[in-house]
């Protein structure tokens, strides 16, 4: 299951006073209008759905939120590393060394050698949260994906291209 963004084929139109209220509420909450409308629709649906449909909706909503959070954490980590730990090596590779002789360029050092204690703490916390998100996504996808497995692929013994013993695909 993968979260995807979909939009209406035609734009949603609001009455003037409704638009003003939505826009004001969004600004007051620190959200953009799209995020506010999506959240309001989620709440509205949750109040009206029941049974398996509600359970499936909750699982898909959680997956979507986790994927978005993981994406944001990945971007934050890349920014921290790019502008922090790896900036010195990047700058020195731009300013030093003979570009014609690639073998003379310095190699990037490990992240532990480049960061201060606070930056390292933040990096390790981001990595821990990404790992927790990954584990939770596996749990959720185990519940939501069909139980049918692809008929061939990587197994404990290696890659298998054909089904075993006359199984049909």
Image (cartoon, rainbow, N blue to C red):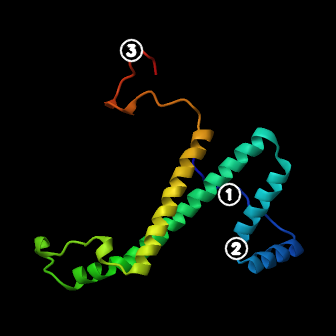
Front one among 31 and 18: 31
- Mark 3 vs mark 2, CA separation in Å: 57 Å
List the residue tagged with mark 1.
7
Q: Which mark is residue 93?
A: none
- Against 140, residue 27 (above or below) is below
Residue 135 image position (x, y, % from top left): 52, 51
The picture quadrant where one finds residue 33 is bottom right
Q: Earlier in the sequence, mark 1 or mark 3?
A: 1
Comparing marks 1 and 3, which lies closer to the viewer? Answer: 3
Task: Please give the residue where the numbered disc 2 appears in the rendered image.
Answer: 32
Residue at 73% of width from left, 62% of height from top?
38
- CA gap, disc 1 to disc 3? 47 Å
Secondary structure state at the residue bearing disc 3:
loop
4 relative to 129, above or below:
above
Q: Quadrant of the N terminus?
A: top right
Q: Position of residue 62 (x, y in %)?
A: 65, 54
Q: In front of the other: label 1 or label 2?
A: 2
Which residue, given by chain and number where applicable, does mark 3 sit on? 165
Mark 3 or mark 2, earlier in chain: 2
Instruction: Work out whether residue 23 or residue 28 is closer to the camera in this orientation and state it.
Output: 28
Q: Secondary structure at mark 1?
A: loop
Q: Relative to 81, does residue 153 appear above or below in the rendering?
A: above
């Amino acid at each position: 299951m993968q979260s995807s963004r979909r939009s209406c084929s035609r734009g949603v139109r609001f009455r003037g006073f409704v638009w003003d209220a939505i826009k004001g509420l969004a600004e007051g909450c620190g959200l953009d209008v799209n995020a506010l409308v999506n959240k309001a629709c989620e709440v509205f649906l949750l109040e009206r759905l029941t049974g398996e449909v509600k359970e499936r909706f909750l699982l898909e909503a959680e997956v979507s939120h986790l994927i978005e959070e993981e994406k944001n954490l990945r971007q934050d980590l890349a920014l921290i590393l790019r502008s922090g730990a790896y900036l010195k090596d990047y700058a020195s590779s731009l300013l030093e060394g003979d570009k014609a002789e690639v073998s003379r360029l310095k190699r990037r050092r490990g992240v532990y050698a480049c960061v201060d204690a606070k930056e390292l703490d933040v990096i390790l916390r981001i990595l821990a949260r990404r790992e927790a998100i990954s584990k939770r996504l596996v749990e959720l996808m185990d519940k939501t994906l069909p139980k049918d497995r692809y008929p061939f692929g990587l197994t404990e013994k290696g890659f298998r291209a054909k089904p075993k013993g006359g199984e049909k695909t």
